[in-house]
């Protein structure tokens, strides 16, 4: 689960595709009932291959909570199309995505709406081999970043370096695509990469015993914004036509994530039962790591802070990644999350 699943599409034309085929939500919005055998189907598309970010949904499905709420929840992997494209074309009702995908889509007029923050704070870091001497953003000067060449990558790295007193013009950027970062780092093809601590850092540092150093994004929110990645999204037509179904889905999903926080072993088991080819040790360690990070307050899992939205949108505008601010009041809602205020 590298950052590639969002960056390869972020700010790069997803919205144009979505505008071509946004369809009405499926179903009539009537309540399903497990006892009568009639269930409301909800197609959930992942943002990447199954991993612990999705564990709350897998756990709720494994426990039968969705069915007891009158829901038939199907989990779909996005393939090459991408989660937001499947959402926009009506092939999914709910999508795992990230603000860096949703905001540009909204800027292009696509009526996608964030309905929950899956993880409360950004768990991204820049990672380097410890022998590189990279410990803080200013140390990135004179080194090479390996990534997908996306504008968001450059804006974030440059913002961190500039804020720490370095010259971002002296940071080199290499487009390397979806590769095994360890190989490139050890061969000296690049010096640092963008990873997710809940997966990549655990794999490299704990399981493969690679001696690494990291610069967590969350340690530098004086320089760059915090933002929601991943998050759950739907569409305005889905909310209008099937709001009651979404409400039931989100109530059960919140229960799944609250349980994943309380019982990470159960969350890991549910994910591994569904996707047994995953590395069990990695999944269990990752589930334990995220158990304390899905939410600052389990009773308010999924809640989105307007201030986080405002600052992230302003960052994208200031960096020239979108032309004008979007109306955040239309871009997200807390109406479906338990404990929303």
Image (cartoon, rainbow, N blue to C red):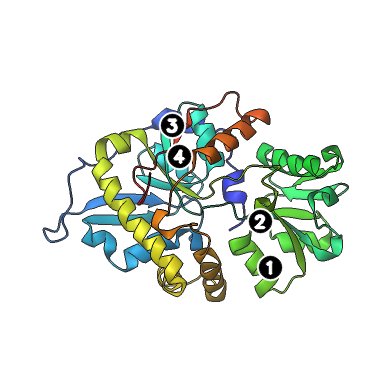
Q: Secondary structure at mark 4?
A: helix
Q: Is residue 51 visible?
A: no
Quarter of the figure with residue 71:
bottom left
Upstream in sequence: badge 3 or badge 2: 2
Q: Answer left or right for 104 relative to 211.
A: left
Q: Which residue is mark 1?
A: 204
Task: Answer with mark 1 or mark 4, whichever residue precedes in sequence.
Answer: 4
Checking the image for residue 97, the label placed there is: none
Task: Tell me the mark number nearer the camera, choosing from 3 and 2.
Answer: 3
Q: Residue 85, which numbered label?
A: 4
> Looking at the image, do the residues carrying marks 1 and 2 touch, with CB atoms under 8 Å apart?
yes
Which x, y percent locates residue 277?
Answer: 50, 71
Which quadrant, please, contains the N terminus?
Answer: bottom right
- The answer to whether mark 4 and mark 3 are in CB contact below 8 A is no
For disc 4, the neighbor class at 10 Å (few under 14, some 14 to 19, many from 20) is many
- For label 2, count other residues whose C-alpha is less than 10 Å away and answer few (under 14), some (14-19) or many (20+): many
Determine which quarter of the picture holds residue 68: bottom left
Furthest residue toward left: 36
Residue pictured at 88% horizontal, 47% vertical:
142
Residue farthest toward the front in the current orientation of the protein: 341
> Gap in Å between the C-alphas at discs 3 and 2?
30 Å
Q: Label 4, label 3: how many angstroms apart (C-alpha)?
A: 22 Å
- Residue 58 lies, in percent from the top left, at 39, 63
Residue 329 numbered mark, or none: 3
Q: Which mark is residue 195?
A: 2
Q: Residues within 10 Å of mark 1 (few under 14, many from 20)?
A: some
Q: CA distance from mark 1 to mark 3?
A: 39 Å
Whole-Å distance between the Cαs marked 1 and 2?
10 Å
């Amino acid at each position: 689960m590298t950052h590639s699943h969002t960056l390869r599409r972020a700010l790069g034309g997803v919205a144009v595709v979505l505008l071509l085929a946004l369809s009405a939500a499926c179903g009539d919005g009537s309540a399903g009932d497990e006892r009568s055998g009639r269930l409301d189907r909800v197609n959930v598309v992942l943002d990447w291959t199954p991993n612990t970010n999705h564990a709350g949904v897998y756990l709720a499905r494994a426990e039968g909570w969705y069915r007891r709420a009158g829901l038939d929840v199907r989990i779909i992997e996005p393939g090459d199309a991408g989660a937001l494209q499947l959402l926009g074309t009506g092939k999914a009702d709910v999508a795992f995505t990230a603000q860096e995908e949703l905001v540009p889509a909204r800027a292009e007029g696509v009526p996608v709406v964030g309905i929950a923050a899956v993880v409360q704070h950004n768990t991204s870091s820049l990672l380097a081999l410890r022998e590189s001497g990279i410990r803080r953003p200013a140390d990135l000067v004179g080194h090479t970043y390996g990534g997908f060449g996306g504008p968001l990558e450059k804006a974030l790295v440059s913002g961190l370096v500039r804020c720490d007193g370095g010259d971002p013009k002296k940071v080199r950027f290499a487009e390397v695509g979806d590769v095994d970062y360890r190989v490139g780092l050890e061969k000296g093809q690049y010096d640092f990469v963008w990873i997710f601590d809940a997966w990549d850092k655990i794999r490299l540092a704990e399981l493969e015993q690679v001696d690494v150093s990291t610069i967590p994004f969350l340690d530098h929110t004086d320089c760059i914004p915090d933002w929601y990645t991943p998050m759950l999204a739907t569409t305005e037509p889905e909310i209008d036509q099937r709001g009651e179904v979404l409400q039931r889905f989100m109530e059960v999903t919140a229960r799944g994530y609250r349980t994943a926080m309380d019982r990470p072993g159960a969350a890991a088991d549910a994910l591994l039962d569904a996707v047994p080819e995953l590395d069990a040790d990695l999944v269990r360690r990752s589930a334990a790591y995220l158990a304390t990070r899905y939410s600052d307050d389990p009773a308010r899992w999924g809640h989105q802070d307007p201030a986080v939205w405002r600052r992230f949108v302003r960052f994208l505008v200031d960096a020239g990644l979108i032309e004008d601010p979007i109306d955040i009041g239309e871009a997200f809602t807390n109406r479906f999350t338990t404990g929303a205020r």
